[in-house]
Amino acid sequence: MGVPTKVLLDYMHLMLASEFLRRLNIWFDHQSDNGFLAECKDEVDVALLNVKFSHDFNRKLRLINELEMER
């Protein structure tokens, strides 16, 4: 059973149920009808690199090009 297409976008579905990664895969896929961000990967990566965190935040954002895109 797949994830419903008309689901409320809340924390549980976006983060805990991997819905966010599923949506990223769709948005960055050149072959998808909804792949509206496929041409913007490099721009998104630059924006992610420019995010500044406080000194006690010890994690870094992963770049879009580093994500393993599923088909």
Image (cartoon, rainbow, N blue to C red):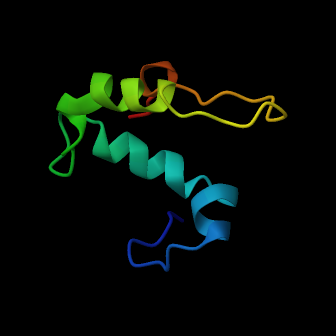
Of 39 and 45, nearer the camera is 45
Of 14 and 33, nearer the camera is 14
- The relative height of residue 71 versus residue 21 in the rendered view (above or below) is above
Q: In this rendering, would 21 be left or right of 24?
A: right
The image position of residue 29, as x and y in percent, is: 27, 36
Residue pictured at 41% horizontal, 52% vertical: 23
Q: In this rendering, would 53 be left or right of 67?
A: right
- The relative height of residue 26 versus residue 38 in the rendered view (above or below) is below
Residue pictured at 17% horizontal, 35% vertical: 31
Evaluate whether residue 42 shows in this view. Answer: yes
Residue pictured at 24% horizontal, 40% vertical: 37
User: Dividing the picture into quarters, in which one does residue 47 lie?
Assistant: top left
Task: Determine the residue located farthest toward the right in the rendered image.
Answer: 56
- The relative height of residue 46 versus residue 37 in the rendered view (above or below) is above
User: Dividing the picture into quarters, in which one does residue 25 lie?
Assistant: top left
Task: Determine the residue located farthest toward the front in the rendered image.
Answer: 55
The image position of residue 65, as x and y in percent, is: 42, 20
Q: Quadrant of the C terminus?
A: top left
Q: Quadrant of the N terminus?
A: bottom right
Of 47 and 36, nearer the camera is 47
Q: In this rendering, would 21 be left or right of 23?
A: right
Evaluate whether residue 68 shows in this view. Answer: no
The image position of residue 54, as x and y in percent, is: 74, 37
Marker count (numbered): 0
